Amino acid sequence: MGEVEPNGGVASSVNLLALAARVESEGRYNVAKLLRAAVFARAQREADQALEEAPRGDELLEALHGVADAFATDPLLVPLSEPLRAGTRAFAAGAVPLIDEVPDPLVCRRCGHVAMAEAPEACPRCAADGVTFLVQRPVWWLERYDPASAMAQLERTPARVRALLDHIPVSAWSQRPEPGTWSPHEVLSHVRDAQGVLEQRVAAILEHDDPDLEAKMVWSWNQEARPATTQEVLDAYLASRARVLEVLRGAPADAWWRTGRHREFGRLTLTQQVSYFAAHEPTHLRQLATAAKG
């Protein structure tokens, strides 16, 4: 197995992963991570290029059913088949697929064996320790920030929001830069709604032992009437953020590992919940920045 293919391209993804496994067996983990990153980058680039051709609507649901059928006939992927069917049914009904129906899959990083919800003590195929299985979480930003970094992000975002709004004329706050995009008012309303959910969940986790955390489809806010002015939305966002920061600053260090049970994402620590919302906001600040440039 050569590292470079005859046409001058990089080795196949399979070969790169095999090289990564071999390098890891020699204890050179910082080399292996580069090879694994190359595999992910290549697959993601190809997927991005194919996105425009991906199905939508009913065709998307049909495609998911077809994938579930294919998984059911693949000995390696059988464990994914029924959860995919359950998730697709919820999707078709307009509901959010919940963690009880679609648990997190775990993949043996040595041989690819798939388990659902919990890893075995040892892989039944290659005997690798279950603790080494890779967990596929529904969103990556649950682990983006540690407590200090999450707090820093929450503290600096309000000033960025105000600075961006200062560069947008009041007359343009409700105007969409382009068809299909959000206006500054819509972006800010979404950020305000997400901040409200964060405030509720921080209080629940700190005040109760392992409380239920209702799944909120905050991204669907614009299906509801929003009579408040942009200034009122901004004031509500800033006031809620100030309250949350005050609560978190006063929380003891071990409180960051208190948990709540999220119906969509499973059991989450306070750290993960705060990290999620801290990482969520910058994606929408870019929308405000685009409107400001316009």
Image: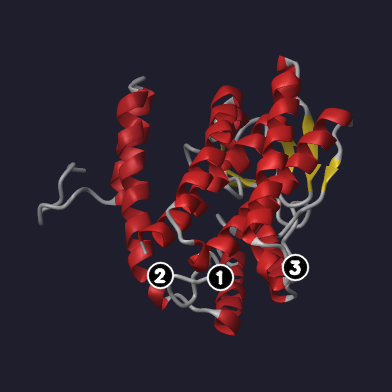
- Point out the frontmost of discs 3 and 1: 3
Q: Is residue 38 left or right of residue 6?
A: right
**Residue 118 appears in the rendering:** no
- In the image, what residue type sits under mark 3? Ala
Label 1 crowd bin: few (<14), some (14–19), many (20+), radius 10 Å: some
Residue at the right extreme?
A: 208
Q: Report the residue at 70% width, 76% height from top.
A: 92
- Mark 2 to mark 3 CA distance (whole Å): 24 Å
Number of residues whose C-alpha sits closer than 10 Å to that of mark 3, classed few (under 14), some (14–19) or many (20 or more): few
Tell me the mark number nearer the camera, choosing from 2 and 1: 2
Quadrant where the C terminus is found in the figure: bottom left
- x then y, percent, for residue 193: 70, 54
Considering only vertical position in the picture, is 133 above or below 179?
above
The CA span between labels 3 and 1 is 20 Å
SS assignment at label 3 = loop
The amino acid type of the residue labelled 1 equals Val
Which comes sooner in the sequence, label 2 or label 1?
A: 2
Q: From what the image shows, is residue 96 above or below residue 153?
A: below
Question: Could you tell me which residue is drawn at 72 percent across and 41 percent down?
Answer: 240
Whole-number angstrom distance, CA of label 2 to CA of label 1: 17 Å
- Disc number at residue 51? 2
The residue indicated by pointer 3 is 95
Provide residue 143's location: percent of width, then percent of height: 57, 35
Residue 95 at least partly seen: yes
Please tell me the numbered disc located at residue 67.
Answer: 1
Residue 108 pos. (x, y %): 54, 39
Instruction: Name the element at disc 2.
Output: helix
